[in-house]
Amino acid sequence: MKRRDFVHHICPSIVLVHLATAVNSCKDSAEPVENVPEAVIKEFASVSTRYNDEGYYMQGNLVYVNLSNSNLSKLVNNLGYANLLDAGVLLLRTDVNTLKAFSNCCPHQGNRAAWVFEKGRFKCENHGNSYNVNEINTVSCASNSISGGLIRFELIQYKNYIRVSKL
Ligand code: FES
């Protein structure tokens, strides 16, 4: 087959395969910002006046977060993290489509206030141990673990609102 024929016949197929792979990759990494259940949208409406000054509201094991709050708005589009200290939640944006929630209880001795995110891991500066955010070998709060992964919570996002389930 001549080079020109190859380019015309084979390359479009290759491009389509790569495009489909890219789309599927995006789907895999994206949090469920679409197809949010109607009941959850109603929950967001019902708590809309209850957010504290730091931008969140706790109800049992659920934490509702308003990313429009000035303390958290950096996470709308930018990579970064926030520690919702009293809610027990670390929020982490790893890319434009992915926002994750983790327990902020250190698996070593349970400190919640000394987190920094560096080199793709959360590090607790209390004793310097760091933990992965990939759910590999997750370790429990205050279990004297000096390695492993932080416990991840389910997160549903609708527009600038987030619901974290600490179950
Ligand atoms: S309490 Fe976090 S490293 Fe020790």
Image (spheres, helix red, strand yellow):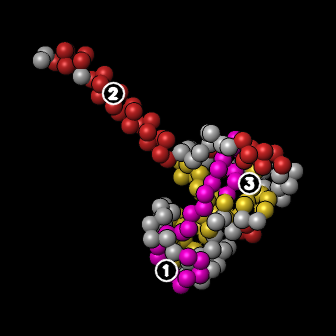
Q: Give x and y (percent) for residue 80.
A: 60, 55
On the image, numbered disc 3 is attached to which residue?
A: 65
**Label 1 CB-ligand 1 distance < 8 A:** yes
On the image, numbered disc 2 is attached to which residue?
A: 15
Q: Is residue 99 above or below residue 139?
A: above
Instruction: Provide the residue span drawn in magenta.
Output: 140-164
Q: Are marks 3 and 2 in contact (CB under 8 Å)?
A: no
Q: CA distance from mark 3 to mark 2?
A: 40 Å
Left or right? Give the position of 95 relative to 113.
left
Residue at 39% x, 31% y is 19
Crowding around mark 2 (Cα neighbors within 10 Å: few <14, some 14 to 19, many 20+) is: few
Residue at 49% x, 71% y is 138
Give amino acid for label 3: Val
On the image, numbered disc 1 is attached to which residue?
A: 146
Disc nearer the start of the sequence (3/2): 2
Q: Nearer the viewer, residue 70 or 142?
A: 142
**Label 2 CB-ligand 1 distance < 8 A:** no
Q: CA distance from mark 3 to mark 1?
A: 30 Å
Q: Are marks 3 and 1 in contact (CB under 8 Å)?
A: no
Q: Give x and y (percent) for residue 142.
A: 59, 81
Q: Is residue 25 above or below residue 87?
A: above
Regarding mark 1 in the picture, which secondary structure is present there? loop
